[in-house]
């Protein structure tokens, strides 16, 4: 059977779908990932990117952190692609119960998705480490050096950096959604970032689908594996 047709049948039969996605969902909107051949980890900086986006680096080399952050992690002009819009429509139709994302770009919400669980936070939210006041992405983008709050405190992106823990409430909600789903669609993620990738182990439903350009650790247990662009796949589906 054609894989797109098989996926369509699975979606048609499902009542409680959860989507678990990663960087591959946003690369089609022009946002680079970290691990591909052309990703951020493959580029040359004075420090390795994974060191720059760590809590320690933010704390002790804050100016250099924000130089990288503004240059490589903020894409205010990015727009939702067909993967984002399909998922929003699927939620509006009552079939999709949650989007669990490792991305920090807010594109799922921009497409219209309501129940989005952001495992790693969002660049759209930034807060003062002293008083807690929140600032939007435009404030960070237009500021120079280390962005400061009116109270004098340093502003930090509401993003989970290396060495930081995921939000406990988000973890609980994600695990609950996955454990209650009848279908779990994993898309645009290589499933190498933990603890997030381990959440799929809580799935007890009927249909496990993987849509990713490269192989993942979930392929061997999935009912359906499609090695293709997720936007292309979702564009071929009907609600």
Image (cartoon, helix red, strand yellow):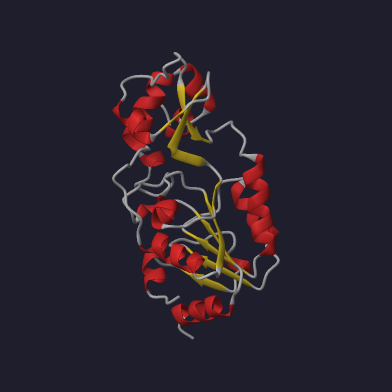
Q: Position of residue 92 (x, y in %)?
A: 48, 66
- Name the residue nearer the viewer: 113 or 46: 113
Q: Could you tell me which residue is drawn at 60 percent across and 45 percent down?
A: 194
Tell whether 1 sits left or right of 196.
Answer: left
Vertical relation: 214 (above or below) 164: below
Tell whether 180 sits left or right of 44.
Answer: right
Q: Could you tell me which residue is drawn at 62 percent across and 39 percent down?
A: 167
Q: Residue furthest bottom?
A: 1
- Name the residue nearer the viewer: 51 or 180: 180
In this rendering, does residue 207 appear at all? Answer: yes
Q: Position of residue 30 (x, y in %)?
A: 31, 50
- Name the residue nearer the viewer: 74 or 90: 90
Q: Residue furthest top?
A: 152
Which quadrant would the C terminus be assigned to in this image? bottom left
Q: Position of residue 98 (x, y in %)?
A: 56, 59
Q: Quadrant of residue 124?
A: top left
In this rendering, does residue 46 appear at all? Answer: no
Q: Could you tell me which residue is drawn at 34 percent across and 26 percent down?
A: 67
């Amino acid at each position: 059977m054609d894989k797109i047709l098989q996926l369509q049948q699975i979606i048609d039969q499902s009542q409680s779908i959860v989507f678990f996605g990663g960087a591959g969902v946003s690369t089609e909107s022009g946002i680079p990932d970290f691990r591909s051949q052309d990703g951020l980890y493959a580029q040359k900086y004075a420090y390795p990117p994974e060191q720059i986006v760590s809590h320690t680096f933010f704390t002790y080399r804050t100016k250099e952190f924000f130089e990288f952050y503004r240059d490589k992690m903020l894409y205010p002009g990015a727009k939702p692609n067909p993967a984002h819009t399909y998922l929003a429509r699927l939620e509006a139709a009552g079939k999709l119960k949650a989007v669990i994302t490792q991305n920090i770009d807010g594109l799922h919400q921009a497409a219209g998705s309501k129940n989005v669980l952001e495992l790693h936070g969002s660049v759209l939210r930034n807060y003062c480490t002293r008083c807690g006041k929140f600032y939007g992405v435009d404030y960070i983008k237009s500021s120079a050096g280390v962005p400061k709050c009116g109270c004098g405190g340093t502003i930090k992106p509401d993003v989970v950096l290396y060495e930081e823990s995921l939000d406990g409430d988000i973890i609980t909600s994600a695990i609950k959604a996955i454990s209650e789903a009848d279908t779990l669609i994993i898309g645009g993620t290589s499933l190498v970032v933990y603890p997030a990738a381990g959440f799929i182990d809580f799935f007890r439903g009927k249909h496990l689908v993987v849509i990713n350009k490269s192989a993942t650790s979930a392929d061997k247990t999935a009912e359906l594996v499609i090695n293709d662009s997720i936007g292309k796949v979702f564009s071929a589906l009907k609600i």
